[in-house]
Image: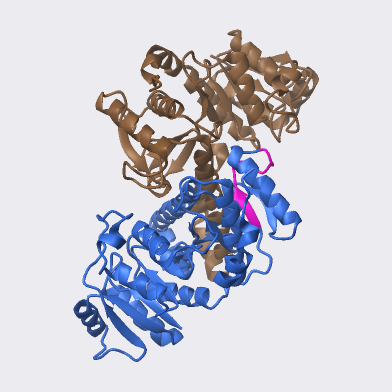
Chain colours: A brown, B blue
Amino acid sequence: MKIIVDAMGGDNAPLEIVRGALQANETYGVEIILTGRTEAVLRAISECGRKELPKGVEIANASEVVEMSDDPATAFKVKKDSSLTVGLNLLRDGKGDAFVSAGSTGALLSGATLVVKRIRGIRRAAMAPQVPVMGGKAVLCDCGANAECTLEYLVQFAFLGSYYAQHVMGIEKPRVALLNIGAEAEKGDELRRDTFARLQELSGEGRLNFVGNIEGSTAMMGGADVIVADGFSGNVMLKSLEGTGKFLYETMKGMFARSASTKIAAVLMKECINEFKDMLNPSEVGGTPFLGISKPVIKAHGASDALAILNAVRQARDFAQSGFIGDVERDVELMRVEKS
Amino acid sequence: MKIIVDAMGGDNAPLEIVRGALQANETYGVEIILTGRTEAVLRAISECGRKELPKGVEIANASEVVEMSDDPATAFKVKKDSSLTVGLNLLRDGKGDAFVSAGSTGALLSGATLVVKRIRGIRRAAMAPQVPVMGGKAVLCDCGANAECTLEYLVQFAFLGSYYAQHVMGIEKPRVALLNIGAEAEKGDELRRDTFARLQELSGEGRLNFVGNIEGSTAMMGGADVIVADGFSGNVMLKSLEGTGKFLYETMKGMFARSASTKIAAVLMKECINEFKDMLNPSEVGGTPFLGISKPVIKAHGASDALAILNAVRQARDFAQSGFIGDVERDVELMRVEKS
């Protein structure tokens, strides 16, 4: 198993990215290709306390870096020798099994779509992070790649999310729900009503385990394993839960600092407070896979530290060996929606 | 000041509704009209320990009750003698200054729109609750009344939310932001880009204090006083923050119960834990005003207890005496969007 890692992408590149990749190489025994300026990558490796390139780690030189100021739609093409484009080319050419980048989300998505390509028959790739919910995690699919969706996109996201939950998270019959503004079949707009009807049919045929419409509140309380959404409302849900988590964590921290007795409580609760924080920490949660691309591409958080990269590489490995893509390819005809 | 209260709406009607209304009459000195079956209302008043109708409290008999199973679009018309319809008629006829109901949201919205009517020139009424954010509260406008929106609706929601924040919440120059999936002007769909441009213009003319696009995360950290959204994504945000709050509160409670030492911490933190819970408690937050209706209508939470009704009546009073509706009527021409 060989994972390609964009050494130059993200706020803490290259040092933290390289550190995380080296840790993954040691911890999980996966081989690593680091893409980036050879000199910068070697310096980072030396700053990690390594005198030479560890066994199973190689560098693919790339002279350019995609910046956040570059146009995401064209950056991968304009900067042909960027760490991002070099990585995607290696993935397309079968030199590695998956690609991890903490760089520009938009550039990675465009590049993945146009260099690595989508699975034949899949209309759009979806971003599908695992979000923390009561009792575990749920796949939120899509959370921002497609602001505007059609019935077919949403039906395909339902399949992609369900297959991912099954193959990569090990959930046998994932409960698939449609994010909506009420539980009843007639809720929401026309797109939601059409999608509800189609998913209901597919569920009747045993192709999916559709449990109906779901509101954000029920979703957060663990009502589904897969939350199907257009990229706009999925992103609103994701950002709202991140923001609420941060707001409540800060509020709680303030409460623990309030008086002598609450400070004692803080000491007694130290472990729990850390656990609470970790639960909401994107570095722990791992990266966001682009479902629907013909090879595994994982977007790590822009602020990724070594731990986040370690987790994203593990996730990339799990994705690559899960059989997810093969099974989507096999069943893609079933995910079609005929135009009426 | 006279507030009309639907005594029969909500999960805890009539007892908790009547209890809250009587408390509001005592606490704030507002007069109350309770709509509902006279007998049931009198029984509730007696269960509250009152031998007779308190001064300033009257009953308007209504023989029917709108049930959650009734069609929300037509219930107010089919059940002409319901506590909801009787209350709306009294409001329309100037027998009271505002109407509070914990009954069916959809029925109340249809009824308010068709009986009390919208402010002339306002295209749609919006539901605009105050949501808890870092450092205070923000108005979320719309959060579910209009799943599908036009540019004009969103521009009007921006004005309605801003005027409400100014008049009722006392914020001098409310920061108005558009809920979107990124901060940049070109983010989101066409509707968002058009709305961004128009709000930008209005801000330039000094009509609004538009601070740009906002993501759910920044919104929760207190980045705006007014969050403008279509009813679909606004509802997703509202429900996600409610669900995340509940999930994290439950998680925290579990952590405090974990061991002997965390149980000691729970005792030391008792007051803070209650405060944390209250911050997320819809009963404390108050009701949701329908902005754009020509008279104040407040939807209290379906699960309202006496405290929630007390708060909703106070909010109705503040709304009624704020001058909000008069100022919207005066400026409504400025809220028009010419079809291009």
Residue B185's place in the image compared with A157, above or below, is below
Residue A88 % position (x, y): 64, 16
Looking at the image, how many numbered discs can be counted on the residues?
0
In the image: residue B204, left or right of residue A316: right
Residue A65's place in the image compared with A219, above or below, is above
User: In the image, which residues are magenta?
Assistant: B176-186
Q: Nearer the viewer, residue A159 or A89?
A: A159
Residue A210's place in the image compared with A272, above or below, is above
Tell me which corner region of the image, top left, top right, bottom left or bottom right, holds residue A135: top left
Residue A234 % position (x, y): 50, 39
Residue B218 in view here: no
Name the residue at 25% across, 63% down.
B79
Residue A46 % position (x, y): 75, 25
Residue A193 in view here: yes
Asked whether residue B66 is drawn in magenta, I would say no
Main SS of the magenta segment? loop
